[in-house]
Image (cartoon, helix red, strand yellow):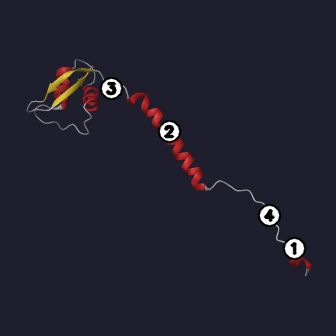
């Protein structure tokens, strides 16, 4: 019965990082990386070649075709969409659009 009187001995164990901390660190690193990579080109705004006021019957395609000579019109339409931060190609008469330098 002498063994019962001895104090219990602690067994040291290695403490592993909890999975939550590892995931948090990985997400934080990814967000910082995306922020730095996205910030490089995000500050550069397209150079405006001018503006145009949309008339009745105008489309982005017709505006791009009349203001840009040569090249692929699809690229010019995409440039107009980007320069004006449009989410769709639907435009309204009276709207003023920025035309990027092509």
Q: Indicate which disc residue 11 carries.
A: 4
Q: Nearer the viewer, residue 59 or 52?
A: 52
Looking at the picture, does residue 69 appear above or below residue 12?
A: above
Residue that sits furthest to the right in the current view:
2
Q: How packed is label 1: few (under 14 Cα within 10 Å), some, or many (20 or more)?
A: few
Quarter occupied by the N terminus: bottom right
Q: State the CA–CA distance, disc 3 to disc 1.
A: 76 Å
For discs 3 and 1, the disc positioned in front in the rendered view: 1
Residue that sits furthest to the top in the current view:
69
Q: Mark 3 or mark 2, which is nearer the start of the sequence?
A: 2
Secondary structure beneath disc 1?
A: loop
Q: Mark 4 or mark 3, which is nearer the start of the sequence?
A: 4
Mark 4–mark 1 contact, CB under 8 Å?
no
Q: Which residue is mark 1?
A: 6
**x then y, percent, for residue 14:** 74, 56
Q: State the CA–CA distance, disc 2 to disc 3.
A: 22 Å
Q: Nearer the viewer, residue 28 or 8?
A: 8
Residue 99, quarter of picture: top left
Q: Which residue is mark 2?
A: 32
Q: Indicate which disc residue 14 carries.
A: none
Q: State the CA–CA distance, disc 2 to disc 4.
A: 40 Å
Q: Mark 1 or mark 4, which is nearer the start of the sequence?
A: 1
Q: State the CA–CA distance, disc 4 to disc 1.
A: 15 Å
Q: How packed is label 2: few (under 14 Cα within 10 Å), some, or many (20 or more)?
A: few
Q: Which residue is mark 3?
A: 45
**x then y, percent, for residue 52:** 15, 25
For discs 2 and 4, the disc positioned in front in the rendered view: 4
Q: State the CA–CA distance, disc 3 to disc 4.
A: 62 Å
Mark 3–mark 4 contact, CB under 8 Å?
no
Residue that sits furthest to the left in the current view:
56
Q: How packed is label 4: few (under 14 Cα within 10 Å), some, or many (20 or more)?
A: few
């Amino acid at each position: 019965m002498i063994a019962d009187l001895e104090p219990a001995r602690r067994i040291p164990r290695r403490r592993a990082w909890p999975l939550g901390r590892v995931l948090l660190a990985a997400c934080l690193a990814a967000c910082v990386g995306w922020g730095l990579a996205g910030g490089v080109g995000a500050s550069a705004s397209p150079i405006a070649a001018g503006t145009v006021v949309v008339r009745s019957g105008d489309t982005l395609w017709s505006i791009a075709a009349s203001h840009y000579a040569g090249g692929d019109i699809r690229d010019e339409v995409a440039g107009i969409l980007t320069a004006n931060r449009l989410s769709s190609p639907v435009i309204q008469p009276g709207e003023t659009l920025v035309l990027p330098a092509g």
